[in-house]
Image (tube, helix red, strand yellow):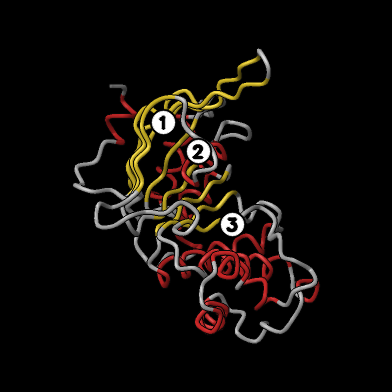
Amino acid sequence: MNTAAQTASRTDASPLIRLQNVRKVYRTGRTEALAISDVTLDINEGDLLSVVGPSGCGKTTVLKILAGLHDADGGTVSIGDGHGSFVEGRDVGMVFQQPLLLKWRTISDNVILPAQILGLPMKAARERARDLLQMVGLGQAGDKYPFELSGGMQQRAAIARALIHDPKLVLMDEPFGALDAITREKMNLEMLRIWQESRKTFVFVTHGIQEAIFLGSHCAVLTAGPARMADFFRIDLPHPRHLDIKTSTTFGDYVKRVYRQLGME
């Protein structure tokens, strides 16, 4: 087993997610493109895993495998904590780079959309939507339309929508990549607060190294495609985290560790 895989192997009896030597190949006609060559990691319930690597390295492919949108072509994928079934779709929430809110629906109606699709009771869904909008700081915005909100506020609504059906796992694909730098910093703080209040398991994909360290309870580092997991480690920084932690020596050491794995030193 390689060093990264050894680091990734955890002693926890029942991780929520376990990937072992996962491989993915995209095929178009007679052409094959290796997207992921080797990814091995464990994620426990309640973790916030940051997945960091250069653009095009296969980070989104990892998310699609976790979401059940793609099958792995090699290795094993196990999702579920051993204490009940894990239903793909029902137990997964997704947040994308763009909020993808329906412009003709109010924010509340956008948030309850997954519950409608899944056929969940609407009275309970609307009550949960009100609670979630309050949690993400949009308690007064339920009756507004997407065009009335800023980009950061729209993305908060998208996070509430991902939580509406009470998923066990929330997957986030560079959700703050389209925001300006100041709004992105604010959303990082909001992200940590929402994670701690929701007590969900998050997998957060980013190509921002500092963002990965600031947000994550753990960090997986993927090399340039085809993705190979170069490192997997716990981020031992105190909570609650504030932006000034980025000036600390410990934070800087974690950033340097990722730089080394990506050949940036």
Q: CA distance from mark 2 to mark 1?
A: 9 Å
Vertical arrangement, residue 254 with respect to residue 30, above or below: below
- Indicate which disc residue 49 carries: none
Q: Quadrant of the N terminus?
A: top left
Task: State the image coordinates of residue 208 (x, y, percent, origin top left).
Answer: 57, 45
Q: Badge 3 local density, few (<14 within 10 Å), some, or many (20+)?
A: many
Can you give x and y, in whole percent of width and height, for residue 6 in the image? 27, 30
Question: Residue 264 sits in which quadrant?
Answer: top right
Alpha carbon distance from label 3 to label 1: 22 Å
| Residue 10 x, y percent position in the rendering | 24, 41
Label ID, residue 62: 2
For the residue marked with disc 3, what is the amino acid? Val
- Point out the tag, 2 or 1, that comes first from the N-terminus: 1
How many numbered discs? 3
Please name the residue shown 58% across and 42% down the image. 207
* Residue picked out by circle 3: 95
Classify mark 3: helix, strand or loop: strand
Q: Nearer the viewer, residue 71 or 187?
A: 71
Residues 7 and 129: in front is: 129
Q: Indicate the quadrant where residue 239 lies.
A: bottom left
Q: Are marks 2 and 1 in contact (CB under 8 Å)?
A: yes
Name which residue lies at 48% across and 33% down: 222
Q: Residue furthest bottom?
A: 140
Task: Identify the element where label 1 is drawn.
Answer: strand
Q: Kindly identify which numbered label has been placed on residue 39.
A: 1
Whichever of labels 3 and 1 marks the residue nearer the N terminus, that label is 1
Name the amino acid type tagged 1.
Answer: Val
- How far from the left and from the top, in percent, is residue 14? 23, 48
Left or right of residue 129, residue 81 in this image:
left
How crowded pointer 1 is (Cα within 10 Å; few <14, some 14-19, many 20+) is rated as many
Residue at screen point 29% across, 34% down? 7
